[in-house]
Image (spheres, helix red, strand yellow):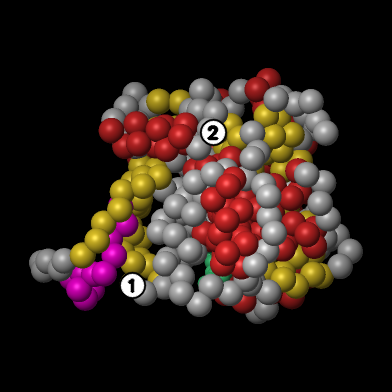
């Protein structure tokens, strides 16, 4: 085991989700419709990942930006409640905390995001001495963070030089330009973790297999999430397929990808082989679909363990 004080440092965006469910129709300009339920919770891919990984008994710290407002309090309280270390989160003097309005229709959803302070996170916000005390760096939502985007290769290179392993989940590009220097960046990324649609856009490939083949010459491990079809990984030698742990009645799929990442990375920092990490990722992705929102199913290691055995018949003691 490592003697470093922090297992995983997450660098990324912070916002709240305002989730509207059971909506009577589609919104139209000049009209009004009713949503029959609402939840206001911790949002953002990076924060959901950090919170859920902490609930898998990893020591997690966060570096990001928030505003000086009530949403910031909600973000910090939610992370602290799940024991994520927040002392390196910077408060912006000029921007509000970001927020996403989520309109949920059956299993799919439409999101509108106000980025706020997440636009300002920059490389100067990263305390590299602090980072050197961690084992692993995770960065998410590349396209949503203009302030740090141009320096992401430097961030990953420095993390590798400091002896950390690294992971990157790009998430969706709201501009749909998919402009990312993969050839330059991926050599410093231990685990590249897009979903299937994101992979196809970034590589201009026609299939997951082709996308992986395009990246193989310069990537390390490639992990591709594919919704209820499960996931596929390239571990540097073999292609490994993982079916989903089927949940026929998902409450919602918010944060399934981030929860998958949490399970995978928990396995990875424990030294498990990629095949086992992939299985743990699929399990925690499925666990996420059993409760509302991105963090609802990850209250504590004990509740995660209970859902794993009761819903998926899988013995898991994080
Ligand atoms: N309905 C489902 N039932 C069981 N498992 C699921 C379901 N949906 C997703 N998963 C699991 O969660 C993993 C991640 O989900 P998905 O592919 O939707 O990620 P994503 O598109 O990155 O999600 P996100 O919107 O959270 O970023 C999948 O690989 C799968 O193992
Ligand atoms: Mg995703």
Q: Is residue 81 above or below residue 16?
A: above
Residue nearest the viewer, comparing 64 with 260:
260
Asked whether residue 135 is drawn in magenta, I would say: no
Asked whether residue 25 is drawn in magenta, I would say: yes
Residue 154 in view, yes or no: no
Graded by Cα atoms within 10 Å as few (under 14), some (14 to 19) or many (20 or more), the crowding at tag 1 reads some
Question: Which corner quadrant of the image does residue 136 belong to?
Answer: top right
Q: Which secondary structure lies at badge 2?
A: loop
* Picture coordinates of residue 63, whole percent (x, y): 54, 32
Residue nearest the viewer, comparing 2 with 231:
2
* Picture coordinates of residue 274, whole percent (x, y): 80, 58
Residue marked by disc 1: 105
Quarter of the image with the N terminus in it: top right
What's the mark number on residue 66?
A: none
Magenta-drawn segment: 18-29
Task: Give the mark nearest the N terminus, 1 or 2.
Answer: 2
Residue that extends furthest to the top in the rendered view of this protein: 129
Residue marked by disc 2: 84
* Picture coordinates of residue 46, whole percent (x, y): 52, 45
């Amino acid at each position: 085991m490592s003697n470093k004080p922090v297992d995983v440092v997450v660098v990324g965006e912070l916002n709240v989700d305002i989730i509207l469910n059971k909506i009577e129709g589609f919104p139209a300009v000049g009209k009004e419709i009713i949503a029959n339920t609402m939840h206001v919770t911790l949002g953002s891919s990076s924060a959901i990942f950090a919170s859920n990984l902490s609930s898998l008994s990893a020591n997690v710290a966060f570096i990001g930006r928030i505003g000086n407002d009530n949403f910031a309090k909600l973000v910090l309280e939610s992370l602290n409640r799940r024991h994520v270390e927040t002392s390196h989160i910077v408060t912006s003097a000029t921007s509000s905390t970001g927020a996403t309005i989520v309109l949920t229709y059956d299993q799919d959803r439409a999101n509108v995001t106000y980025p706020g302070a997440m636009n300002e996170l920059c490389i100067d916000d990263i305390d590299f001495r602090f980072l050197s005390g961690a084992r692993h760096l995770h960065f998410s939502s590349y396209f949503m963070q203009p302030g740090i985007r141009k320096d992401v290769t430097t961030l990953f290179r420095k993390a590798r030089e400091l002896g950390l392993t690294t992971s990157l989940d790009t998430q969706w590009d709201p501009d749909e330009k998919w402009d990312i220097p993969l050839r330059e960046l991926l050599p410093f990324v231990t685990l590249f973790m897009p979903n299937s649609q994101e992979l196809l856009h970034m590589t201009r490939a026609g299939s997951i297999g082709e996308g992986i083949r395009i990246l193989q010459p310069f990537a390390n491990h490639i992990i591709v999430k594919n919704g209820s079809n499960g996931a596929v990984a390239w571990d540097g030698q073999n292609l490994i397929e993982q079916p989903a742990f089927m949940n026929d009645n998902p409450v919602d799929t918010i944060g399934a990808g981030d929860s998958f990442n949490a399970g995978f990375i928990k396995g990875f920092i424990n030294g498990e082989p990629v095949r086992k990490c992939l299985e743990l990722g699929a399990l925690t992705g499925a666990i996420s679909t059993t409760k509302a929102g991105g963090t609802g199913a990850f209250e504590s290691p004990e509740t995660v363990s209970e859902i794993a055995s009761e819903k998926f018949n899988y013995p898991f003691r994080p």
